[in-house]
Image (cartoon, grey):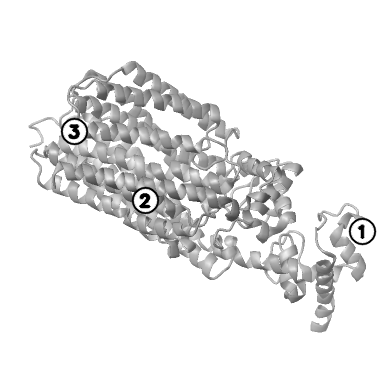
């Protein structure tokens, strides 16, 4: 090979690759509005992205799979956890991870910031990214089912999807708010009170640590039936 | 034995780089303690993992760049047959760069961050870095322009560092859209490590190999053209292997996947040409350890960056391994194999010359070489096992992040132990480099 051929290889390789890359970059920008739903990219979402940066979340959590691997991926966190759980975790990590082997720092995030963060994560969750990460796809599907046709879901999935961030049941969920089997046998509420309690805990029991849940009436009914059935279920077993 | 007085400016670049290397590894150990043990909430609140990780990665980038800049300043006068354009600019640039780096690390401790992995440093400090980079490029360019004899190697080196600085700019703006943010984040990270840094590596290594082996310039420069051409051909479109899951068009799977699968090719060439040049050397081997590093770099580069990268970036594999400890494994092996070893090779080439030592005592250095190399390889394997385990538990068995990580705990603890050995090796190497002693000629033979 002569020096001239070598130089030719250099320029040909570099320029052809750069040309392809720049063209695809152009196309990337053309397709991004569709793939990331930029029509939903509101100022609140952008504010949430700034919160995400401000507290350096990305140096423990991955998002779109990038960042540090010390804590779970946040791409589909909105579906996995829901708005309420994200708020509880970010505002009170020391409580939520009291029994965990790995801790999340209390960073003093404010409530308005959490709202923005949730808006950001909801928008991120909707990015069309070929169903990555694989392990969270079930939460995405469950969320969509829960929204559209709750009657088709198994009760336990509804309950754990909506409440599993704080309550546990048969080794599922995170036990900081108590296990449903125990709660069911402790509470004396009737069905209507229990539904009211879920939607606005403080109206039934002032000072309750549980935050109000943003559930549809229909979903709340399913959950109430589930919990109340556990009570009789236990008596039958005995 | 330096030929030009201005080569001495690189000494402080190299010393600072070595100190930062140790700091980086200490931070790495602290991170592995975070993984392997449960820390009290009070401690996590004041010094979270995220802060330590920002320091670990930023110090890495800082000592890499210091090594490249120092290395460039050391070889450039020899390559251009003249003094550097200005040693004052070189020192000024070092002071600006170092103070920005120190301020950044202290700032992280107080939460002063942009919160963007690896590119955390806030805007005012970024501006300082840009100033330092401009000074550096101007200094290199002026030295080359004023050289009597021009060579391909000079231009390649200048092109590499300019490309490097240019790409950094894409990480600086605030992007409203997360997917666009990460699109350009990779213009910095990927086009650095699989583009600009490779060109700098290829150029510096071409020079060192030429100098040490005495192989003809014509041959070395031919290889340099072909290798850098292939690096850029595969590496630029290969950026696509980061765009599979960010919400980019479908064709990235093909373009990214195929070009990235070709990325090991230029590294294979590098191994071949290093091996050939070493075999066909015209000079005798004076310092075996320097040659260890030259050959070690080529092979480690191929394994860590080439092989690991190849396996991890095939789209069907990456769907499962992306964002897991497999990435950690690849990251450590690739950065150590390609760039930490490059810097150490430069230091072993430059520091003895700076001290006027022809043949240095290398017993301690050999211990350092083998300890760091073997410990890092083991660490890569341990992270790899943890990563495959994580992928299997989390993404096939579907058992959840926390349970998977509890199951991986054994491997995190092993990683901590191996990390301790690695730190020992690094301390030995750094100590050896900073206290090089000549062999009493005649006494040893």
Left or right relative to B284: residue A209:
right
Residue depicted at x 21% and y 34%: B152
User: Residue A166 is drawn in which quadrant?
Assistant: bottom right
Q: Position of residue A87 (x, y in %)?
A: 73, 51
Rendered position, B166 above or below A200: above
Secondary element at image label 1: helix
Alpha carbons under labels 3 and 2: distance apart: 28 Å
Which of the image's four quarters has the C terminus of chain B? top left
Look at mark 2 in the image and give the residue it sits on.
B333
Viewer-side residue, B87 vs A45: A45
Question: Dot 3: within a 10 Å radius of its alpha carbon, few (fewer than 14), some, or many (20 or more) residues?
Answer: many
Alpha carbons under labels 2 and 1: distance apart: 58 Å
Question: Dot 1: within a 10 Å radius of its alpha carbon, few (fewer than 14), some, or many (20 or more) residues?
Answer: some
| Pointer 2 and pointer 1 on the same chain | no
Look at mark 3 in the image and give the residue it sits on.
B360
Residue depicted at x 9% and y 38%: B283
Alpha carbons under labels 3 and 1: distance apart: 81 Å
Q: Position of residue A204 (x, y in %)?
A: 92, 58
Is label 2 in contact with label 1 (beta carbons under 8 Å)?
no
Question: Dot 2: within a 10 Å radius of its alpha carbon, few (fewer than 14), some, or many (20 or more) residues?
Answer: many
Instruction: Please report whichever mark, 3 or 2, sits nearer to the chain's N-terminal start.
Output: 2
Q: Position of residue B298 (x, y in %)?
A: 25, 48
Secondary element at image label 2: helix
For mark 2, name the chain.
B
User: Residue A180 is drawn in which quadrant?
Assistant: bottom right
Q: Is residue A67 visible?
A: no
Viewer-side residue, A16 vs B406: A16
Look at mark 1 in the image and give the residue it sits on.
A204
């Amino acid at each position: 090979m002569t020096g001239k051929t070598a130089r030719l290889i250099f320029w040909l390789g570099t320029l052809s690759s750069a040309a392809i890359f720049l063209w695809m970059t152009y196309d990337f920008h053309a397709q991004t509005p569709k793939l990331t739903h930029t029509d939903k990219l509101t100022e609140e979402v952008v504010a949430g992205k700034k919160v995400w940066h401000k507290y350096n979340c990305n140096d423990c959590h991955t998002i779109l799979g990038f960042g540090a691997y010390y804590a779970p991926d946040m791409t589909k966190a909105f579906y996995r956890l829901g708005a309420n759980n994200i708020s509880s975790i970010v505002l009170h990590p020391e409580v939520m991870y009291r029994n965990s082997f790995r801790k999340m720092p209390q960073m003093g995030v404010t409530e308005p910031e959490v709202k923005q963060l949730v808006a950001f994560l909801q928008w991120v969750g909707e990015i069309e990214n070929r169903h990555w990460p694989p392990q969270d796809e079930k939460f995405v599907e469950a969320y969509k089912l829960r929204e559209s046709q709750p009657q088709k879901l198994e009760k336990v999935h509804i309950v754990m999807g909506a409440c599993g961030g704080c309550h546990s049941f048969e080794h599922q969920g995170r036990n900081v708010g108590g296990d449903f089997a125990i709660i069911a046998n402790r509470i004396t509420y009737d069905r209507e009170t229990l539904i009211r309690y879920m939607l606005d805990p403080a109206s039934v029991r002032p000072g309750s640590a549980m935050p109000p849940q943003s559930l549809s009436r229909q979903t709340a009914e399913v959950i109430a039936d589930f919990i109340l059935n556990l009570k009789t279920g236990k008596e039958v077993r005995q | 034995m330096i030929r030009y007085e201005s080569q001495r400016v690189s000494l402080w670049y190299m010393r600072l780089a070595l100190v930062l290397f140790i700091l980086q590894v200490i931070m790495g150990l602290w991170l592995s303690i975070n993984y392997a043990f449960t820390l009290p909430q009070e401690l996590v609140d004041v010094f979270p993992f995220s802060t330590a990780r920002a320091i670990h990665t930023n110090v890495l980038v800082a000592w890499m760049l210091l090594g490249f800049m120092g290395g460039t300043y050391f070889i450039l006068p020899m390559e251009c047959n003249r003094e550097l354009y200005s040693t004052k600019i070189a020192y000024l640039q070092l002071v600006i760069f170092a103070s920005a780096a120190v301020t950044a690390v202290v700032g992280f401790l107080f939460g002063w961050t942009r919160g963007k992995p690896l590119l955390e440093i806030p805007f005012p400090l970024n501006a300082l870095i840009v100033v330092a980079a401009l000074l550096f490029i101007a200094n290199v360019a002026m030295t080359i322009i004023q050289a009597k004899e021009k060579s391909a190697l000079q231009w390649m080196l200048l092109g590499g560092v300019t490309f490097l600085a240019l790409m950094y700019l894409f990480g600086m703006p605030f992007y409203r859209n997360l997917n666009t943010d990460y699109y350009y984040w990779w213009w910095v990270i990927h086009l650095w490590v699989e583009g600009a840094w490779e060109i700098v590596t290829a150029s510096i290594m071409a020079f060192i190999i030429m100098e040490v082996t005495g192989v003809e310039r014509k041959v070395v420069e031919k290889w340099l053209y072909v290798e850098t051409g292939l690096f850029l051909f595969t590496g630029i479109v290969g950026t696509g292997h980061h765009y599979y899951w960010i919400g980019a068009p479908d064709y990235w799977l093909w373009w990214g996947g195929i070009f990235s699968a070709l990325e090991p090719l230029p590294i294979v060439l590098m191994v071949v040409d290093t091996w050939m040049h070493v075999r066909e050397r015209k000079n005798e081997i004076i310092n075996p350890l320097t040659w260890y590093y030259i050959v070690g770099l080529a092979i480690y580069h191929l394994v860590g960056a080439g092989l690991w990268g190849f396996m991890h970036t095939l789209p069907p594999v990456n769907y499962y391994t992306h964002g897991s400890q497999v990435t950690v494994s690849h990251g450590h092996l690739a950065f150590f194999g390609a760039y930490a070893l490059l810097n150490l090779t430069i230091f072993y080439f430059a520091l003895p010359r700076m001290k006027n030592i022809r043949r240095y005592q290398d017993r301690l250095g050999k211990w350092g070489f083998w300890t760091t190399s073997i410990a890092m390889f083991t660490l890569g394997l341990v992270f790899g096992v943890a990563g495959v385990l994580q992928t299997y538990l989390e993404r096939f068995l579907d058992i959840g992040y926390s349970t998977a990580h509890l199951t991986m705990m054994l491997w995190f603890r092993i990683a901590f132990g191996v990390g301790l050995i690695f730190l020992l090796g690094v301390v030995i190497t750094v100590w050896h480099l900073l206290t090089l002693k000549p062999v009493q000629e005649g006494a040893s033979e």
